[in-house]
């Protein structure tokens, strides 16, 4: 292998390590922010939160913890189950980190609207 090829290989390895390090740090920060948002919601009176907001949080939470929706849509008589399923299904394809960030952002939105 030529000297320039060795140099390029080392540079590529260094850049890859940096990117992986940033991704790990970003994931840890995202996870921490998500966990903080869960704690912030604990004292909230959910009767004051709109059904639309609760459904969005539900769909995001399922996407974070289960991934893409893997169940059949509930029957026509189960209106609540269908709404929850639709919310989760609407999150399909969203990465765990994206869902955690969106969840935390939505909690901030809810808290601001209740203040």
Image: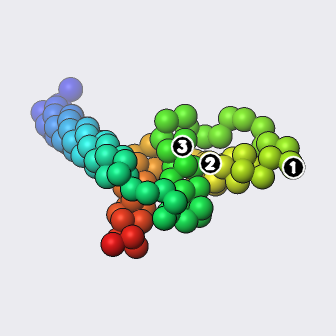
Kindly identify which residue carries mark 3.
63
Q: Residue at x 43, y 57 (%)?
A: 45
Query: Foreground: 41 or 62?
Result: 41
Element under disc 2: helix
Kindly identify which residue carries mark 1.
76
Q: Are circles 1 and 3 on residues that touch, CB within 8 Å?
A: no
Kindly identify which residue carries mark 2.
88
Position of residue 114 measured from the top left corner of the image (x, y, whole percent): 39, 70
Dot 1: few (<14), some (14–19), or many (≥20) neighbours within 10 Å?
A: few
Query: Is residue 100 depicted above or below 113 in this figure?
Result: above
Q: Residue at x 48, y 64 (%)?
A: 48
Q: Earlier in the sequence, mark 3 or mark 2?
A: 3
Query: Foreground: 56 or 15?
Result: 56
Foreground disc of the pair 1, 3: 1
CA distance separating discs 1 and 3: 23 Å
Q: Quadrant of the N terminus?
A: top left
Position of residue 17 measured from the top left corner of the image (x, y, whole percent): 20, 36
* Left or right: residue 30 compared with residue 46: left
Q: Is residue 34 visible?
A: no
CA distance separating discs 1 and 2: 17 Å
Dot 3: few (<14), some (14–19), or many (≥20) neighbours within 10 Å?
A: many
Position of residue 61 measured from the top left corner of the image (x, y, whole percent): 50, 44
Quadrant position of residue 2:
top left
Q: Are circles 3 and 2 on residues that touch, CB within 8 Å?
A: yes
Query: Foreground: 102 or 79?
Result: 79
* Left or right: residue 12 compared with residue 64: left
Q: Earlier in the sequence, mark 1 or mark 3?
A: 3
Position of residue 87 measured from the top left corner of the image (x, y, whole percent): 63, 53
Element under disc 1: loop
Foreground disc of the pair 1, 2: 1
């Amino acid at each position: 292998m030529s000297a320039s090829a060795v140099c390029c290989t080392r540079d590529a390895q260094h850049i890859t390590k940096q990117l992986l390090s940033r991704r790990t740090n970003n994931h840890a920060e995202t996870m921490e922010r998500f966990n903080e948002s869960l704690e912030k919601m604990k004292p909230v009176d959910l009767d004051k939160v709109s059904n639309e907001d609760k459904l969005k949080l539900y769909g995001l939470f399922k996407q974070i913890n289960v991934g893409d929706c893997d169940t059949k849509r509930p029957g026509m008589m189960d209106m609540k189950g269908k709404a929850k399923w639709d919310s989760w299904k609407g999150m399909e394809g969203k990465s765990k980190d994206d869902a955690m960030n969106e969840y935390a952002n939505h909690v901030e939105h809810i808290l601001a609207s209740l203040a």
